[in-house]
Amino acid sequence: MLELLAQTGLNAVYAASYISLVAVGLVLIFGVMGVVNFAHGELFMAGAYAIVALYADMHVPFFVAVAIGLVFVGCLGLLMEKALFRPLKDNPLGGLVASIGFLMILQALAVMGFGVRMEHIPPVTQEVIAFSDKVRLPVARLYVIVAALVLLSALWYFLKKTKFGWALRASAQDPEAAALQGISITQTAKIAMFIGAGLAGIAGALTAPLVSVNPHMGHSVIVTAFIVIIVGGVGSLEGAIVASVAYAIVHTFVTTFYDGVLADIVGLCLMLIVLIVKPTGLFGSADRA
Amino acid sequence: MTNFLEVKNLTMRFGGLTAVDSLSFKVEHGTIHGLIGPNGAGKTTTFNMISGFYTPTEGQVLLRGEDISGLHMHEVARRGVVRTFQHSTLFAELTVLENALVGTHMPFRPNIFAAIIGWDKEDRHGAEARAKEALEFFGLDGLLDEKAGDLSHGHQRALGMAVAYASHPDVILLDEPFTGMNPEETRQMMDLMERLKADGITILIVEHDMQAIMGLCDNITCMSFGKFLAEGGPTEIRNHPAVIEAYLGGARHVA
Amino acid sequence: MPKFMIWIAALAALIALPHGLSFSQQEILVFLTINVLLVASYRLLTLTGEWSLGHVVIMGVGAYTSALLTKKFGVFVPVSMLMGGVAAALIAVLLSFPLFRMKGFYFLIGSFAAGEIIRLLWKRFRDPFGGAKGIKGIDPMPDFSIGFYQFDFFEPTSYYYFAGFIVIICLWILWRIEKSPVGLTFHAVHWQDKLAQASGVNVRAYRTLAFAIASGFAGISGALLAHYVGTINPNAFDIDLMVFVLTWAIVGGTATFYGPILGCVVLTVINEIVLRELGLEQMRPLIYGAIMILSILFLPNGLESLVQKATQKRAGNGAAQRSPAE
C-alpha cells in the first residue's frame, strides 16, 4: 500500500510538471494580453508533432528536436500575437474567437500532415530509476520534471530580477501606466507570447514519447489548464503552479484508486467549490476578470 | 413620532481604516438636506451605506422607523429611496426614452408572461407616459430617441435624475450633482431640485463644494474625518467655527 | 410591399426550400433549424452580458430528459419535448446559485466546468444515462396527418416542417420577450447593473430569469434533436459544438435578434454545403477557422453590421440602430 502511494505520488509529480508548464504559459499570455488563448492546447500538440516529425521521422537527436520544437512553437505564438491578438487588442471576446479559429487551423494542419491516427514515437530512453520493486520512475518522465523545475525557476528569475521581467509584470498590471513609463506594450506582448507558447511547446515535445500523439490531444490539456488557472486565480503565476500541483495530486490519486472519469468530475467539482467560496480563485484579485 | 429618514451611529471600517465613525443625523420629510465635508470626510461612504451599496459595519439607517441598512440596493430603492451616481452613470447604449423606462421599473413591474401574450398594453402605456413625464420635467422631451451616451454633459446629468424621478421616489439621493458644471448649468440644476422638492420629494445631497448648496439646502450636516461635525441651517453652518476650521484646514492641507 | 407580404413570401420560401435539396442537404437543413433555436436562445443569455460555455450541455439536458421520459415512462413525444425544456430551465436555476457568484471570464469557465460535470455524470452512470454510448432507439415523433399533408418522420422534410413550426413559435416568444419591458431590463442589467439596481431592479433575479429562459429553449432544441437522430450520447454535447454556437453568435453579431441566426445560417451553409460541394473535405476545419479569424478581424461587429448598413442606406436616416462594440 505504501508503495502504491509512493508510486502514485511520483505520477502526480510528473503530471504536475507538465500541467504547470502549460498553465503558467496560459496565465502569462492572459496576464499580459488580456486574452484567453483557447489554442493553447494546440500549441502543446504542435510541440508534440515537432517531435514526431524531427525525432521519429527524421531521426534528429531528441534534445535537439525538443529545442527546435520549443522555438517553433514560440514562433507560432509570435505569429498569433502579430496576426490575431495585436489587431484585436480592444476586443477580448474577439481574441477568444480568433484563437478558436487558430486552433481549428492547427488541428486541420496536423490532420493533413500526419493523419488522424495515433503516432507512436520510439522511446527516448528505456532507463528507469527503481526506488523499489514497485516504485519506479521512468527517466523520460524525469526529463519532464526536471524541465519544469528548471524552466519555471528560470522564468521566476526572469520575471522578478530582470528589467524585461519588470516591464512584463508592469504591463500585466496596468498597460497604460506601463506605456507611460516608456515600456513598449508590443515588445512585452511578443516576449510573453513567445515564452507562453514556448512553454506549452516544450511540455508537448517532452511528453510526446510518453503519450499517444494525435491531432485532438490538445483538448484535454486545455481543459486541465483552464481548471488550474481558474483555481489558482487568473493572472497569478504562483497560483497556477500551486493549483497545478493540487490538481495533479487529486486527479492522479482518484484515477489510481477509482477511475479517470470520476477524477475529472472531482477535479471540476473542486474548481467549482473554489469559485463558490472565492469567486476570483485562490490567488486572484478582484479587479482582473 | 418616528423620523422620516434617520442615520444612527453609522460606522464603516475598511480593514483598519475607519471611514465613517458613529455618524448620526436626521433628514426631515420634504426638505433638501445637504451632507458636506472636506475631501475624504466619508460623505460618499455614508451615501453608499444609505443607498444599500455598502453594508455598514455598525449602526442603522432608519426609514420611517424601519432599519434599511444592509438591504440590497434594489430593496432600498423599492422602499422609495433612489440614488443617482457621480459622473454620468447611464445606460449609454440605450436611448433617452429607454433610460427613463428602466426608471419606471418599480411602479410598472414587468411581467414576462403578460409581455409574451400581450396583456401588458396598459402597463406599457403607463410606463411610457410616466417616462415621458419625467423626461419633460427635466426638459429632455425633445431628445427621446437620442442615445444617452451621445448627450451633452448637462443633459446626461438631467437624464440621470430623470431616471431616478421616473420611479416615483420618496427620497432622491444625489451624489455630487454639481461637479463639472458651469454656473448656468448649476443654476438650472438648482431650479430642478426646487421643483422636485415642490413635488414632495425629499432630497439628500452629498457635496464637497459648500458654496454650491448654501442657497439650496434647508438643513446641512457637516462631517470631517468620518465624524459628525455640525448641523444646522445654511447661515449657521457658514459661520460655524468648526466647519470653517475643517474647510480651511483641509484647504491648507491641500495647499 | 406591405410587411405581411414579405413574411408570407419568406414562409413560402421556407416551405419550398427542402424540395430543391438532396437528401443529405435536407438532413443538414433539419440540424440547421434546430441550431437556429439553439443560437437564438444563446443570444437571450448574452443580453444580460454573460457568455456561457455550458449552453450546449443544457441543450443536452433537454435531449436526455425528453429521451428518458419517452423511453422509461412512455410520455407522448411533443409533451416530453416540452418537459425537456422545463428540465433544462430548472437545471439552469440550480446552476445559477454557484455560477452567478462569478463574472466575466470566471463565469465563462465556471459555466464550462458545470457543463462538463453534467456531461461526465452522463458518461459515468450507465443507468439511466447509458454511459459513454448514450441512449439509443429513442422514440421518434409519431406520424400524423393534417389532411393535406402526411407527416412521415423518417423523411427529413417532414421533420423539417415539424421542427420549423416549433422553432418559429419559440423564436416568436423570444422576440416578444426581447421587445418587452423585461427585455429592456435585461439590457439595463447588462450595461449598468448598479444603475439598474438603483432603479429597483433585482439584478440577480433577472440574470437568473434570462439564464432559465435561454436554457429552457436550448432544452427544447435538444429534445428536437434527440427525437430526430434517435440516439444521443455525451459527446454530442461537448465543447466542439459549444465552440460552434459561440462563433455563430460572435461572427453573426449579438447586437440584434437576427445576428446570431444569420451567423448560424451563413457559417453552416459555408461549412456544410459550399465546402463539401467543392470537395474540400479535409480542409474544412482549416477554411472554417480562417473564415472565423477573417470575419472577427474585418467585421468586428458581425455580419449583422452589414445588414444594418444596407438597410440604413435604403431607409435613409432611419431609426438609430443599437450597435454596441463588443
Image (spheres, rainbow, N blue to C red):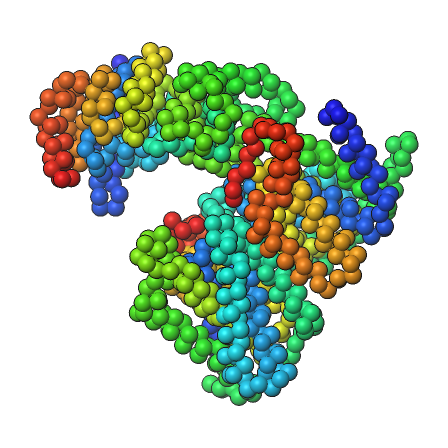
Question: How far across and down, in percent of the image, does residue C181 sit?
Answer: 55, 26
Q: Is residue C166 toward the left or the right of residue B141 in the image?
A: right
Q: Is residue A84 toward the left or the right of residue A180 in the image?
A: right
Vertical placement of A135 versus B180: above or below?
below
Q: Number of callouts in the render?
A: 0
Question: How far across and down, in percent of the image, does residue A170 sit?
Answer: 34, 59
At a point 38% along the width and 49% down the height, the residue shown is A287
Residue C87 visible in the current orientation: no
User: Could you say which is closer to the camera, residue A276 or residue C275?
Assistant: C275
At a point 34% along the width and 62% down the height, the residue shown is A167
User: Could you say which is closer to the camera, residue A22 or residue B227?
Assistant: A22
For the N terminus of chain C, the quadrant is top right
Question: How far across and down, in percent of the image, does residue C94 sit?
Answer: 55, 43
User: Could you say which is closer to the camera, residue C151 or residue A159?
Assistant: A159
At a point 61% along the width and 51% down the height, the residue shown is C295
User: Could you say which is closer to the camera, residue C258 or residue A48?
Assistant: C258
Q: Quadrant of residue C35?
A: top right
Looking at this view, name the residue that lies furthest to the left: B241
Q: Quadrant of residue A104?
A: bottom right
Looking at this view, name the residue that lies furthest to the top: B198
Question: How far across and down, in percent of the image, does residue C225 sit?
Answer: 74, 47
Residue B93 visible in the current orientation: yes
Vertical placement of B11 versus A54: above or below?
above
At a point 50% along the width and 49% down the height, the residue shown is A91
Q: Quadrant of residue B150?
A: top left
